[in-house]
């Protein structure tokens, strides 16, 4: 599956997001149906 139309707090190119809850959204490419997800955070190539 390839995720497209990625958004953070409803923004497509967020810069300087305020601290607080994050709202992440995406769409699946090619009509694929998503059944699960896992979000991984990294900084400088290292897992957080």
Image (cartoon, rainbow, N blue to C red):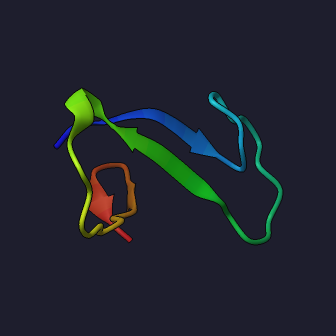
Horizontal and vertical percent position of residue 38: 29, 69
- Taking the spot 79% from the left edge, 70% from the top edge, the residue there is 20
Q: Is residue 41 left or right of residue 33?
A: right
- The C terminus - image quarter: bottom left
Horizontal and vertical percent position of residue 41: 39, 62
- Taking the spot 73% from the left edge, 71% from the top edge, the residue there is 21
Horizontal and vertical percent position of residue 33: 24, 51
Horizontal and vertical percent position of residue 32: 20, 42
- Taking the spot 36% from the left edge, 65% from the top edge, the residue there is 39
- The N terminus - image quarter: top left
- Taking the spot 63% from the left edge, 30% from the top edge, the residue there is 12
Q: Nearer the viewer, residue 39 or 45?
A: 39
Of all residues shown, which one is farthest toward the left? 1
- Which quarter of the picture shows residue 30? top left
- Which quarter of the picture shows residue 15? top right
Of all residues shown, which one is farthest toward the right? 18
Q: Nearer the viewer, residue 36 or 16?
A: 36
Q: Give the mark count.
A: 0
- Which quarter of the picture shows residue 42? bottom left
Q: Nearer the viewer, residue 25 or 39?
A: 25
């Amino acid at each position: 599956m390839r995720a497209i139309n990625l958004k953070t707090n409803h923004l497509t190119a967020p810069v300087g997001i305020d601290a607080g809850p994050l709202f992440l959204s995406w769409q699946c490419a090619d009509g694929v149906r998503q059944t699960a997800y896992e979000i991984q955070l990294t900084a400088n190539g290292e897992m957080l």
